[in-house]
Amino acid sequence: MNRLLVDRVISPDQTLSVMQTAMLAVSCEAGPWDGLWVSEARHDPFLTMGFAAEHTERLSIGTSIAVALSRSPMTMAYTAYDLQRISKGRFILGIGSQVKAHIERRFSMPWSAPTERMCEYIAALRCIWNSWRTGERLHFQGDFYQHTLMPGFFSPPALEHPDPPIYLAAVGPTMTALAGEVADGVILHGFTTATYIAEQTLPALQQGLDQSGRSRGDVAISTMAFVVTGRTESEFAHAAQAVREQIAFYGSTPAYRPVMDAHGWGEAAEELSRMMRQGGHTSADLSAVITDDMLHAFAVVAEPHAVAGQIHERFAGLVDRLSFYTPYQTDDHLWTDIAEDLLTLQSEKAQSDYSSGL
C-alpha cells in the first residue's frame, strides 16, 4: 500500500502575499507536508505558485482548483507549462468546471455540456503540450475548442520534465467517470464520506478507467477531510459547531443531495433545503439538523493525539492524497503536529508490515 500523502491547502479566505506564500511553502517543505495547494476564489491561483516553486525543491504544488471554463485551453496550457518548468516537474494542474451561473455571469464565458467540454478541454491541453514538446503542427478540432495555429515564435521550448499532471474536480458520477477516463487524478469535494467514496465514487471512477483501459493506480484520488479537534474543551466545541454548520450548508444544496441519500438522510436534506428556501434561519438553526451520527460520518472527530490514527483508519488505501478541511481558525502548529503524527504512524506501519513479510 502506498503512503497516504498529506497536503496543506491555502484556504479561500486567506490573503497571502507572494512572499508569504513562498515562506509558507518553505515551512511546509521543512515539515511533514507533501504538497501545497491553492484554490481559486478571491485571488488568482497561479500568481503565487511560481514563487512557491522557486523557493522549494521537494514539495508538490498545485491548484485545487483553478476554473477551467473561464479560460481558453491555450491560456491554461501556457500557465501550467511555465509552472511545470519553474517547479522542475512538481506542478499539479487541478481544474474544475465551476457552474453555469459563475461561468456565464461572473466570467462572461459560454456554458454548455460541462462534462463534454471538460473532456475536450483536457484533450486540447494535451494536444497543445504535445505540439510544444515534439514540434508537430498544432491541429485540434473539437466541438467547443479549435486550436490550429502555433508559429514557432510563440511555441515554448520543450520541457525537461513530463507534462503537468491534470487532476479533475468531480462531484457527481459523470465527472468522476470522466476523471477515470482522461485525467491523472480526481479531486473530490470535501462534502463526502469514506462510505460514499467506497460505494459511489470508486465504481464511477472505475467506469472511466475501464473505458480507457487503465487501472486504479493510473489515477490519484485527492480528497479533503473534515476534522473536528481542539486542544481545549472550548476549542473542540467551536470546531464541532463550525463543521456542523458547514455540513448543513452543503446538505441543503441539491447538487450534494446524493451524498445524504446514500446514507439514508434524504429527509434531513429535504428539511435543510426547505429551511434555506424559507429564509430567516441562521447557520446555527441549520446545524441543529445535523445529528452526531452525521457529524461523525463526515468528519474525523477526535482529540489531537488521536486524529492521525482515525484518518489513517478511515482513508488509507481508499484515497491517495488528503488535506484537512477545517472551517474554523486554530493554531497552525496543531495541523503540522497531526501531519507529523500521520507520517510517523505510516512509517511505523510500513516497517511493521515489512518485518511481517506483508
Image (cartoon, rainbow, N blue to C red):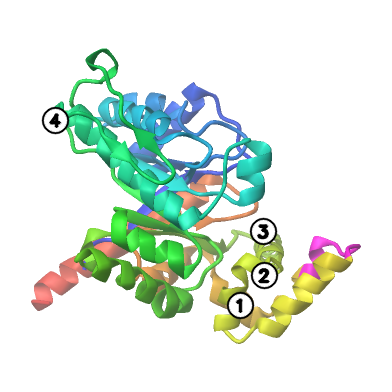
Q: Is residue 268 left or right of residue 41?
A: right
Residue 325 image point, x, y percent:
54, 56
Disc 3 designates what residue?
235
| Amino acid type, callout 1 | Met
Which tag is nearer the camera, tag 1 or tag 4?
Answer: 4
Which mark lies nearer to you, 2 or 3? Answer: 2
- Residues at marks 3 and 4, CA–CA distance in whole angstroms: 55 Å
Question: Real-space Cα distance between discs 1 and 4?
Answer: 48 Å
Look at the numbered discs 3 and 4 and tell me whether their residues touch, using CB distance below 8 Å: no
Q: Which residue is mark 2?
A: 251
Name which residue type carries label 4.
Thr
Q: Which residue is mark 4?
A: 134
Q: Which range of residues does the magenta coloring cover?
A: 279-286
Mark 3 residue element: helix
Residue 227 position by quadrant:
bottom right
Graded by Cα atoms within 10 Å as few (under 14), some (14 to 19) or many (20 or more), the crowding at tag 3 reads some
Which of pointers 1 and 4 lies earlier in the amino acid sequence? Answer: 4
Say left or right for 252 vs 131.
Answer: right
Report the residue marked by disc 1: 260
The residues bearing labels 1 and 3 have C-alpha atoms spaced at a distance of 27 Å
Quadrant into which the C terminus falls = bottom left
Q: CA distance from mark 4 to mark 2?
A: 48 Å
* Amino acid type of the residue tagged 2 in the rendering: Gly
In contact (CB < 8 Å): disc 2 and disc 1: yes
Spot occupied by residue 72 in the image (x, y as percentages of width and height):
45, 34
